[in-house]
Amino acid sequence: MTRLFVPIDSTALSLDAEEVAEALTLGLKRKGAKAEIVRNGSRGLFWLEPLIEVETPEGRVGYGPVTPQDVPGLLEAGLLEGGEHKLRLGLVDEIPWLKRQQRLTFARCGIVDPLSLEDYEAHGGYRGLAKALTMAPAAIVDAVTTSGLRGRGGAGFPTGIKWKTVLGAKADQKYIVCNADEGDSGTFADRMLLEGDPYGLIEGMTIAGLAVDATQGFVYIRSEYPHAFLTFKRAVANARDEGRLGPKILGSDFSFDIEVRMGAGAYICGEETSLLESLEGKRGVIRFKPPLPALQGLFGKPTVVNNLVTLSTVPFILAEGAETYRDFGMGRSRGTLPVQLAGNVKRGGLVELAFGVTLDTLINDFGGGTASGRPLRAVQIGGPLGAYFPASLLDLPMDYEALAAKRGMLGHGGMVLFDDSVDLARQARFAMEFCATESCGKCTPCRIGSTRGVEIMDRIIAGRDIDAQTALLRDLCEVMTDGSLCALGGLTPLPVLSALEHFPDDFKRPVAVAAE
C-alpha cells in the first residue's frame, strides 16, 4: 500500500498539518483510493511546512507547503504516484538544503513514524545499545570520551568526563537526568527530537545508565511543550511494553526505567541544579557548587545531567564508532551541531552540520538572508544570553573556542537574525529585563543587578547623561559576571557588552532636555 507522510511536529501542526491530514483522508475516501497516512516528525524545513511526502519506487517525493485547499488538486494530479504539481519539490533527499547537511543525531527525524519501534529499529535504532551491552561500563565511557562529544545544552562540557566521574562514585543508587527544558529563544532541536525521534533519547539514556551503573532516568520537559510531552510519554510506555525499558532490557541482566516530568515554566530550571531542585519537588533555585551533581545530584545521589541532544547523539557513537563521530568537526569541537535558524530569516529551520561551518554559510546559503529582504545587521547566537554579532563577523566558524574568542557563546545552537531596522540598545535592555524576570532571586548580583540594569538602560535610551550611564553599565556588568552564582546573571552582560562593542551608535541618543 502506498504510504503518505504528514508531519505531526508542532511547527507543522501550527500551520494546519492536522487539517491537511483530515483532507487527505476524506479525499482518498471520495476517490476510492487506498493509502496509509503516516504521521512523521519534521525534517526541519520549516518554511515548507506542512511538507507532505509520498513513497515511490524512486524514493520519497515531497510537496509543500500544503494547505487543506491544495489536497483535492494534489490528488487529481496523481499525488499517490508522485505526480507533477506546482507544489512538487521532487525527491526530498535531493533538496539541496537537506542534501548538504550531515545528519547524524537527526538522521531519523522526519523519516520514521515517531512511535513505531519497528520503524526505529529498521533505521538503525538499538544498534548502539546492543553493542553497549557487550562492553564494560568503563569501555562505554571511554568511547564517549574518545568521540569528543560535549554538552549540547550550552556549557560544552566534555560528556565523557562527566560520565567517568559518576561511574567512579560509590553509591547504592545513581540517576540519569535529561535536561529537556529548552527555553532559549530561537531553539527547537529538543522539541523536534521529542516529537520526531523519541526512541533515540530513550536508547541514549539507557546506554548512559549502563555506562555509569544507573537504573533510573528522568526527563524534564518544559511546560511549553505539551505535544512533545505527550508524545514522549507514549514512547516511554511503548518501550516499556516491548521490553526496551524495565527489567532485563533486550534479554540482558540490565534494568533501566525512565520517568517523564513536566516543568513549571521557569527559565532558570534549564540550569542543572535548579532543575534537580524542581525534580525533587522544591522551588527551582540554584544550588551552590561544589558539591557537583555528578557526586551529589538528584536526591543527593551521583547523577549524570545531560542535554537531550547530547544523550540522543550517544547511540550513533556506540553504533558507528567513536572515531567516526570524532572525524566530524574541528579543534576541540567534534561531531555535528544542530543549528536552529530563527527570527527575521527567509528559510527558518534546523541545519545539522559538522562544527566549523561559517555564519555566512548558515545565514545566507541555508537561511536565505532576512525574511524582510532588508540587509542583515545582527545575529544573536546562543539564546537570550548570547552575544550580538554584526554582519562583519559572518566569517566566524561555529566552534566553541572561536565564538568564545570573540566574546560570544555557542549555547544550544540557536541563531536569531535581525535586519537593519533593529535597535541594539533596546535589545540590550531586553537582556537585562529578561534576567530580572527570570532570576531565581538567590544571589544579589543577578536579582538586583538586572533590575538596576534595566533602569540604567532606560536612562541611556532616554538620552540622559549617556557617558556616565554607559560607564556605570559596564561596571554593573563586571559585577554580574564575577559575582553571580550561575550563568543567568553571569552571562546577561554578554549581549549587553556585545551590543555596546559592535553597535555603539545605538547608545548615542539625542541628549534629553529637562522640562522648564
Image (tube, grey):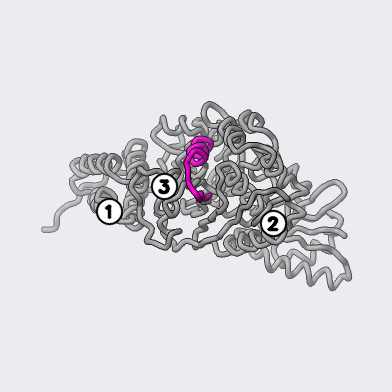
Mark 1 neighbour density, 10 Å: few (under 14) some (14–19) many (20 or more): many
User: Which stretch appears magenta?
Assistant: 158-176
- Secondary structure state at the residue bearing disc 1: helix
Q: Is-magenta flag for residue 172?
A: yes
Q: Give me the disc on residue 114.
A: 2
Mark 3 neighbour density, 10 Å: few (under 14) some (14–19) many (20 or more): some
Count of all numbered marks drawn on residues in the image: 3
| Earlier residue among tags 1 and 2 | 2
The image quadrant of residue 473 is top left
Looking at the image, residue 416 sits to the left or right of residue 29; the answer is: left
| Residues under numbered marks 1 and 2 in contact, where contact means CB atoms less than 8 Å apart | no
Q: Quadrant of the C terminus?
A: bottom left
The amino acid type of the residue labelled 3 equals: Gln
Q: Nearer the viewer, mark 3 or mark 2?
A: 3
Residue 19 image offset from top left, x and y in percent: 69, 68
The amino acid type of the residue labelled 1 equals: Arg
Residue 346 image offset from top left, x and y in percent: 57, 48
Instruction: Answer above or below: position of 195 versus 33.
Output: above
Looking at the image, residue 371 sits to the left or right of residue 155; the answer is: right
Q: Is 96 in front, or is 113?
A: 113
Q: Give me the disc on residue 447.
A: 1
Q: Quadrant of the N terminus?
A: bottom right
Q: Is-magenta flag for residue 110?
A: no
Instruction: Answer above or below: position of 408 versus 434.
Output: above
